[in-house]
Image (cartoon, rainbow, N blue to C red):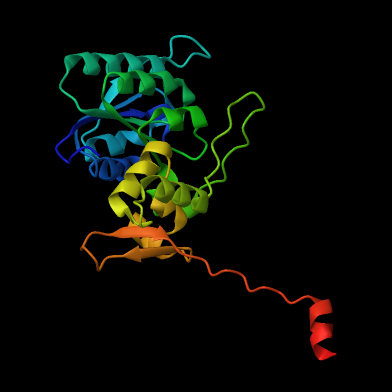
Amino acid sequence: MPSDTSRLAVLIDADNTSPRHAGAVLREVARYGLPTVKRAYGDWTTQNLVGWKNTLPQHAIQPVQQFANTSGKNSTDSAMIIDAMDLLYAGHLDGFAIVSSDSDFTRLATRLRESGLTVYGLGERKTPASLVAACDRFIYLELLTSDAKDEEPPEEPDADVESPPRRPDLRRILVAAIDNTSHEDGWAALGAVGSYISANNPSFDARDYGSPRLGALLSAQDYLDVDLSATGQARVRLRATKPAAKKTSTRKAATKKA
């Protein structure tokens, strides 16, 4: 996990992101590093982005103008990708936060990671699985905004559009992480479990399952034991299950009565 001094570029697809997420996005990014570059891309001459115009100066986000020169083509995506590559080659950053639900940025995320930079994705739940998987970590915007429950229901995707990933089964994720990080005594360090989960499930977020942190989420599972007392460092293991009681057959029971 990068330190809080990591220099990050926050690139926002304004055509694809609501301005009401801006503050929550920057607060979330600040958990992983210092957002030294903050840019939002779109055609600011259109009425579609009016809501962004008051938000930009409040958060010191630089608007990048990109005219829609050709109907049906997303010029914003191209401008954002070109800027990202320029920033990459400048060599002053440790990572990127790509704010979009558009799968067109999948290759960009992959390319940035190939260069050794950390990539955080932030988008709505409709984000296709390919973009989610291309990031080191993906955070759903609905988990960051307090008014998420008041949002309009997501649109049904077209038949030829990649579907968003379903929320993974929590027990399967936790059991796999503990099995792969535990010692011979069955105990696994909480930090190792968290690292394993992040590496194999980019969109995993304890908040998605009703807990503020991973430790609280683990403690709430009745099939896990969480221990803090032994070494002062949190550890977790799968709870041992009691063997099922043997059932006495009807024939044996009848024999005993006789």
Q: Which of the image's four quarters has the N terminus?
A: top left
Residue at x 61%, y 70% (from the top left corner): 244
Horizontal side of residue 4 vs 155, given as left or right: left
Whether residue 164 is visible, yes or no, is yes
Q: Is residue 136 above or below residue 205?
A: above
Indicate the quadrant containing the C terminus: top left, top right, bottom left or bottom right: bottom right
List the single residue furthest toward the bottom.
257
- Residue in the foreground of this view, choosing between 219 and 97: 219
Residue 73 on image: x %, y %: 49, 13
Left or right of 84, for residue 180: right
Q: Residue 86's x, y, as percent?
A: 24, 14
Tell me where residue 27 sits by quadrant. Answer: top left
Residue placed at 48% from the left, 63% from the top? 223
Counting every numbered tag in the picture gives 0
In this picture, is 46 found above or below 200?
above
Residues 192 and 220: in front is: 192
Query: In the image shown, does 229 or 5 lie closer to the viewer?
Result: 229
Whether residue 38 is visible, yes or no, is no
Vertical side of 122 occupied by 142: above or below: below
Rendered image quadrant of residue 18: top left
Q: Residue at x 41, y 34 (%)?
A: 17
Q: Residue 40, located in which quarter of the rendered image? A: top left
- Report x, y in % for residue 219: 39, 64
Location of residue 210 in the rendering, given as x and y in whole percent from the top left corner:
44, 59
Of residues 229 and 72, the one drawn nearer to the viewer in this rendering: 229
Residue at (63, 74) in percent of width and height: 245
Q: Is residue 134 above or below residue 139?
A: above
Determine the residue located farthest toward the top in the rendered image.
Answer: 70
